[in-house]
Image (cartoon, rainbow, N blue to C red):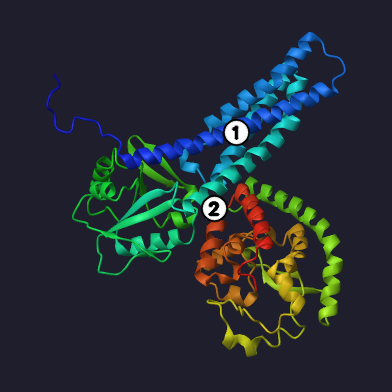
Amino acid sequence: MPLALPSAQSPRSTPTLTRRLRWERRARSRLLVTDLFVVLGVTSLAAAFASAVATRLAPAALEQQLAAPGFTALVWLSMLAAIRSRDAAVLGAGATEYRRVAHATGLAFAVLAAAALVVDWPELRLQLLTAIPLGLLGLLVGRWQWRRQLIARRREGEWASRTILVGDHGEIAYVLERLGATDELGFHVVGAAVRDHAGEPLELRGRRVPVLSTAVSVAESAERMSADTVILAASTEADPEYLTRVRRQLEGTCAELVLFSRLTDVAGPRISFRPVDGLPLIQVRIPTFEGGRHALKRALDIAVSASALLVLGVVAVPIGLAIKLDSPGPVLFRQRRIGRDGQSFAMLKFRTMHVDAEQRLEELRPLNEAAGPLFKLKDDPRITRVGTFLRRHSLDELPQFWNALRGDMSVVGPRPPLPDEATGYDEVAARRLYLKPGITGLWQISGRSDLTWQESVRLDLRYVENWSVMEDLMIIFRTARVVAHPAGAY
C-alpha cells in the first residue's frame, strides 16, 4: 500500500499540453520524411550516375558502389539527428534551423571524406562531389517550404503556442510591441497577468489582450486560459524563489517557461547557459568585428558582387537609355556616404532624380516625413518618372555591387548613412559604423522607408552584433522577394 505523502504523484499532461506536443511531433515527422526523401534521392542519383559512367566493374567494386549511397545516407541522417536539426525549439526559426542543417551536412562531409581517404573508396568520393552539395540545397529548400507552411498556419492561429504574459506593465507592453511586429514567432497571446496594471488597455495587432487576475497562481491562469507557454517579463529580485515556484507549478501544465530580458534584443544569439559547480550562469559572448568569420563574409561579398555585375552588364544599357531619354544629366550618380569606422566613400547609383535635386533639398525639408536625421518624402518632386520605377524595384542600387567588390560596402549590412546623418548619431547609433554598410540588410526586408528611425537603428544594431553568414544568405534571398513584391520603397 503506497504511503499517503503530500504531492507524491507526478504531474500529468493537460489536454492543452498534449495538443501542443502532438503538433510538434507531426511537424518533426514531416521534416524527417522530407530529409529521408532528399538524402536517399540524391545519394541514389549519385550512385546511378556512377553506374552509368562505369565501363567495367569487378564484383568487389560493384559491392562498394552499392554500399556508397547507403553509407552516405546513414552518416548524413545520423548527423542531422545528432545536431538536433528537427528539434521543436528551432521549428520555423529561420537562420538557426538552416544553420543546424548546414552544420550537420558539413560534419557528414568531414566523416565521409575521412572514410574515402582511409579506404580509397572512389564511389564515396563521387557522393561527396555530387550528392552532398545537391542534398544540402534540397534540405534547405525543404526546410524553407515547411517553414512557409508553418508560418501560414501560425498566422491563422494554428500550430502556435497559446501564451500568457506575466510581469510588469511596461515590460509586457514592450513584449507585445515586439510580438506585433512579426507573425513568425509562433506565440498566440491569450492573456496577460500584469502586476502593476492601472487600467491601461493591452493590444496586439489591434486585438485586445485579456488582463488576468494576479490573485491566482500562474499555473491556474495558464490552465484556465488553456495556455502551453508562459513568458515571464518581470524582475525576481524581491523574491529570488519566485521563478523556481512558477517552474514547479507549471509542471504538467505548460511546455515552456520563457524568461524575457531586454538584453536579448541585440545579444540573443550570443547568450548561452553555463552551469559552473551548480551555479547557474548566463554567459554573453562579447561581439568581435574581425577574424575568420569576417574573412568569410568578404569572400561572400566578392562572389555575389562579381555575379551581380555580370547581370548588371546586361541590364545597364536599357536602364541607361531610359534615364537619358527621361531627363538630362548623367546616368550614374555618385554620393558621399559613411562606411566602416567613419570612413567616407563615393557610393554609385543609377540617377533617379533631376540634376538640381541637391539644390532643392532645403526648400523641401519642412515637408520631411521621416524621423531622426533621415530625410524622406513619399511624393518627392525631384524624382524622375524612370527614377520612380527604378527605386520601387531597387534597380537604382545595382551599381553598388561595384562598391561591394571594391570593399567599400558589403552585400549585406547596415544602411549606408549620409555624412549629415552620421554626424547626428549618438553613441548607440554610431555602432552601426562598426561594419561596412550593405546594399541590403534587415532594414530593407523589414519595411525600408516605412520604418521609423528607432526601428531602423534597432534592426541595424541587431545585425551588427549578431550577424552570421547563414543570416546573410537568408537576407539576400528575402531581398529578392522584396524586389519582386516591393513595399515601402520610395
Judge from the rendering whether residue 289 lies leftward or rightward of residue 302; answer left or right: left
Residue 458 in percent (x, y) is at 51, 63
Quadrant occupied by the C terminus:
bottom right
Q: Which corner quadrant of the image does residue 21 belong to?
A: top left
Amino acid identity at mark 2 = Asn
Task: Point out the residue furthest to the bottom here.
Answer: 363
Q: Which corner quadrant of the image does residue 391 belong to?
A: bottom right
Residue 109 in percent (x, y) is at 67, 30
Asked if 472 appears above or below 280 in the picture, the reply is below
- Say the numbered circle drawn on residue 466: 2
Q: Which residue is at 85% across, 24% downward?
A: 53
SS category of the residue bearing label 1: helix
Asked if 455 appears above or below 103 in the picture, the reply is below
Q: Nearer the viewer, mark 1 or mark 2?
A: 1
Judge from the rendering whether residue 88 lies leftward or rightward of residue 136; answer left or right: left
Residue sitting nearer the eye, 407 or 12 = 12
Residue at the spot of label 1: 35
Quadrant occupied by the N terminus:
top left
Asked if 225 appears above or below 108 in the picture, the reply is below
Residue 216 in percent (x, y) is at 19, 52
